[in-house]
Image (cartoon, rainbow, N blue to C red):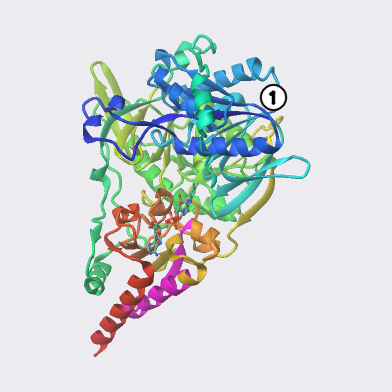
Amino acid sequence: MNFIVLVKQVPDTKHIPQDAWDWESGTLRRALLENVCNDLDKQALAMALKIREQQPGRIVALSMGPPFADEVLRYALSLGADYGILLTDRRLGGADTAATAYPLARAIRKIQTEIFGDDTDYMIVTGMQSVDGDTAQVPPQVAEDLGIAHIAYVDGHTIEEKGGLCFRRVVWGGVETLAPTRFPCLVTVTQWSLPPYPSFGRTRWAFAQDIRKWDAESIGAERNRIGLPGSRTSVVKIFPAIETSHRKGRKIADLRELPNLLKTSFGSSGGNGKERVSGESYQLPKGEAPEYRGDIWVYAEHENGSLHPASYELLGKARDLAGPLNESVGAVVAGECPDDLAADLIAHGADRVFLLAHSSLKHFVPGPYVRAVVQLIQEWHPQIFLFSATPLGRELAPRVAYASESGLTADCTGLVLGDLIRGKTRRIGILQQTRPALGGNIMACIVSQNSRVQMSTARPGVFRAIKRDPMRKGEVLRCVPDLNGSDPGVRVVSIQLASANAGLANTPIIVAGGLGCGSKEGYERHSGGLARALERFFGQSAQTAASRPAVESGFAERDRQVGQTGQTVAPKLYVALGISGALQHITGFEGAGVVLAVNKDADAPIFQASDYGVVGEVETVIPELVRLLDASSKEAKE
Ligand SMILES: Cc1cc2nc3c(=O)[nH]c(=O)nc-3n(C[C@H](O)[C@H](O)[C@H](O)COP(=O)(O)OP(=O)(O)OC[C@H]3O[C@@H](n4cnc5c(N)ncnc54)[C@H](O)[C@@H]3O)c2cc1C
């Protein structure tokens, strides 16, 4: 088995000096930053090295970037890769994800021919996303270009007795194991516990190696598909991320203040279905026609008979956008789903529901899903298509966008209509998509260009769902896609999903514990203890919840996981104990009223997503807080 590992040189986003931003031009002065190897790509290389121990072969490290990006390839060589190839050409610069995936796919074809001698028994391995682009779009788009299977969000692998490879991947509500049935295939790595380290000898060898440099001509790239001309999106402006945070992140040094603070803010807090401020209302300029025509679509994700909560939020946003354009809202559902799902989508804002039904769509694997959705687009021509930024959405949308020649913006937190007028160019009623970029350091506003459909994935928990109206009327269309000859290229080996429902959705108080709780026993003692004390204090019910790693460590059942691949909750009070505050976790409670975090690390990102924070050990803070809450409840009764 041979391997192609995609590695990217990225700016060190943890240390960006303020003068590195050019706010006028919306660019980053890269020369002022340290460059490092994208961490997840290092982990991907580690996985390839591990598999190679049992399945010997060559490892080619491939990168695209400026000439000095050969450093990252030397680093890959020092870790164990055999060849380094750098795709470097001024004409490749300024590319969005589609214009990056295309030349990478061309280079992969060239490696297959020239280095592997047309042997197709190889895997392409890469990090799920890079810290600078942060879109997770390039790998699935490379797979789409090559027409191969893609296994995303992999956090482990096994090799069966007969040598068959299986990959464990993260999905909404649990994990699943997939096995490739044909090669090449592409695997993206989300986490790997054994990162490799370069030895001195290997590093000396790496620096003596020749890094092959390929330009656009040598890979046979068409000019109109690379660089800026080949890009289907463009950045309109960037602005500081700080403007978007609505939490105050106040650190509380004296625990005695907390009962009163919580009581005051609990009364006035939102959460539990509080309606968010809707997107800006837009008006078409008089006498002008919008650039795009067609419906506003959302992809409605479902599992175990229920819709992902983010699908309702997308419908709410789609209604916001459809109104001023005088268009309808469509919801696309694929696979086996219960009959009442379509009615539910209509009640939440869909005018038309497309039910894609086919035996190949029983379970989500990209190949057939992409074909089915693209056929629908070609028939109906929507102007906007929204997906949730869930693992499924972030895997499906990039391939659909690539195959339908559409621009896609990932992880949007703002979607509004606007006009873009520059000189004689008038772009009327287009979708302006705002997203965090460069590790959350800035926000970028992006628009689609040269694009059939304007596509976005939207971060769960950001947009509001509209109130369910069972009297709403809509049309349900059953569509049977033509999937003849579509081979998914993977086999589902096992699926482990949450089977129960802890009922977190309507709970006013949630106390969530993370790995910082130390053990199942610690989790139960502190999360459970505080939940009960808060019940006594507020006289309202409280539930416990957990971060994903806490669930995976057996602290709590899977149905209690909050976050991107767990539950989305909006309680009046959310308490995070020993949780670091990874984006995948905080997206799960963005609609909460008040947030309190307890963490021993004063710099933990969770504090930026909280209203109140206590820096300290869960083991000492929580018993004291429980005592203070009980004392305050007792005082109030007397
Ligand atoms: C595709 C994908 C989907 C994901 N989906 C989710 C999801 O749905 N939900 C989710 O939660 N994660 C999800 N994750 C994982 C996520 O990226 C983080 O790894 C995870 O949220 C971290 O969990 P944690 O905060 O419990 O653990 P850690 O990141 O290990 O943090 C533990 C924290 O506890 C603190 N701590 C340690 N000891 C103590 C102590 N004694 N007292 C106080 N504080 C202490 C530490 O300072 C640290 O901040 C996903 C990841 C991927 C790639």
Q: Is residue 321 left or right of residue 98?
A: left
Residue toward you, 427 or 489: 489
Assess whether residue 536 is covered by the magenta stretch.
yes
Q: Quadrant of ligand 1?
A: bottom left
Q: Position of residue 376 (x, y in %)?
A: 56, 33
Q: Is the residue 117 above or below the residue 356 in the image?
A: above
Q: Is residue 428 left or right of residue 172?
A: left
- Considering every residue shown, the one lying at the far right of the view is 162
Residue toward you, 371 or 218: 218
Instruction: Tell me: is circle 1 under 8 Å from ligand 1.
Output: no
The answer to which image quadrant residue 32 occupies is top left
Magenta segment boundaries in residue numbering:
523-548
In what quadrant of the picture does the N terminus appear?
top right
Q: Looking at the image, which residue is at 40% across and 67% down?
A: 510
Is residue 325 among the parts visible in the rendering? yes
Examine the residues drawn in magenta and state their main secondary structure. Answer: helix
Residue toward you, 180 or 466: 180
* Residue that label 1 marks: 120
Indicate the amino acid at tag 1. Answer: Thr
Is residue 377 among the parts visible in the rendering? no
Q: Residues within 10 Å of mark 1 (few under 14, many from 20)?
A: some
Q: Position of residue 347 (x, y in %)?
A: 46, 53
In what quadrant of the picture does the C terminus appear?
bottom left
Q: Secondary structure at mark 1?
A: loop
